[in-house]
Image (tube, grey):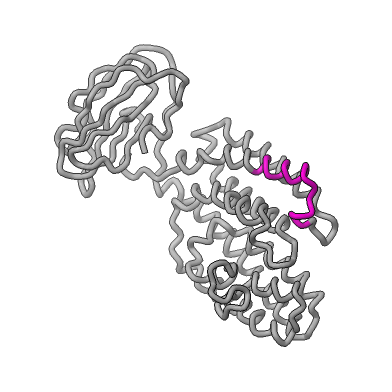
Amino acid sequence: MAGLIVAVSGSEPGGSQTVAVSETECGKGFTPPEPGRQTFQMHNTGDKTSEVYLVDPATNAVYGEIEGLAPGTTRDLVATVAGGSYAWRCVPTGGKAVTSKAVRVSGGAGAKAVVPVSEKDLAAPLAAYRTYVEQGLATLVTQTRKLSDDVSAGHLDAARADWLTAHRTYSSLGAAYGTFEDFDQKINGRPDGLPGGVNDKDFTGFHRLEYGLWHGQSADRLKAPAQQLADDAAGLRKAFPTQTFDPGDLPLRAHEILENTLQFELSGDADQGSGTELATADANLAGTRELLTVLKPLLTTRAPKLLPTVDADVARVQKLLDAAHHGDSWTPVDRLDETARDRLNGATGQLLEDLAPIPDLLEIRKSA
């Protein structure tokens, strides 16, 4: 990954210079470049794989980077250079960061560098999001218990309403799915890939109950799956405080939640009979909005124009989802007219495009 966060102009890169990367020669060969878009040939002369950063030595802000430059190899790093100070920082695997002598380039303003994010920077957003998830899991336990009780009592109409309520709660916690370990598959797994499909013994959780509740299965047949779902929800709530939540997951999930929504919900692939894909998409959008809220302080200082754009995108998608919500019911995806479906897919795609820079902007660069 080279020059991932630098601003790219439409011009061709200028002439290149070869710069050495190692524990002892970081930046050897670096001379003040001309302003404009430049290519630097980064050659690892050491014996360890290295991370390479073009930085502002005064602030540690990053203009460009290469990850995993192997010994003896050369890779291009393209960056837009303007007036300011520049230096190379080389971080060999298992070694200490080495920073080259800085050079000064005359000229006007150019590409905006991005101040690196550390685990410490993400500590407060992570704590806030963990609290959000813990509250959501407490609600989920209550809701899945009620769902199980209604199934046991044979109240299947009530159970269908309970199912949707509980599934929306779970679907709003998307940024934590990677932390949930095996519980996510138990609670929200689909039958895709199971030898027995919807009849497989390992098909459990919300989608197992969805299939049964909307395909005429009896309360007696659904008692065990409903009880298992309630037990798994309680087990997840108990386990979550001790589960490892990688802070780097927060920026990644800002994009991935709705990426999965587009792939599974808006395509109709996840539906097991309820036709409530858009209700799930609405819950996914709420989860994304919560995630953006906790990340806002970091994003505002690094990309001040990004959040207003994303907020407008979110509002556009929300309006389209609201149009498919009628009281207690939701229009199934396959019953949307062609224009409405195209608009929803297009608006979600635009939102994803505008969310795409967040994982790179907030990537943890421990050594930069």
Counting from the top left corner in percent of width and height, residue 221 is at: 70, 85
Q: Quadrant of the N terminus?
A: top left
Q: Is residue 319 left or right of residue 73?
A: right
Report if residue 57 is visible in the image.
Answer: yes
Name the residue: 50% across, 72% down: 239
**Front one among 275 and 6:** 275
Counting from the top left corner in percent of width and height, residue 200 is at: 58, 78
Relative to residue 181, is residue 269 depicted above or below? above
Q: Is residue 30 left or right of residue 133?
A: left
Majority SS type along the magenta span = helix
Name the residue: 69% across, 82% down: 222
Q: Which residues are magenta?
A: 332-348
Q: Is residue 363 left or right of residue 56?
A: right
**Front one among 160 and 336:** 336
**Front one among 92 and 58:** 92
Relative to residue 157, is residue 359 depicted above or below? above
Relative to residue 356, is residue 234 depicted above or below? below
> Which of the 4 image quadrants contains residue 52?
top left
Name the residue: 72% across, 40% down: 316
Q: Quadrant of the C terminus?
A: top left
Counting from the top left corner in percent of width and height, residue 101 is at: 22, 25
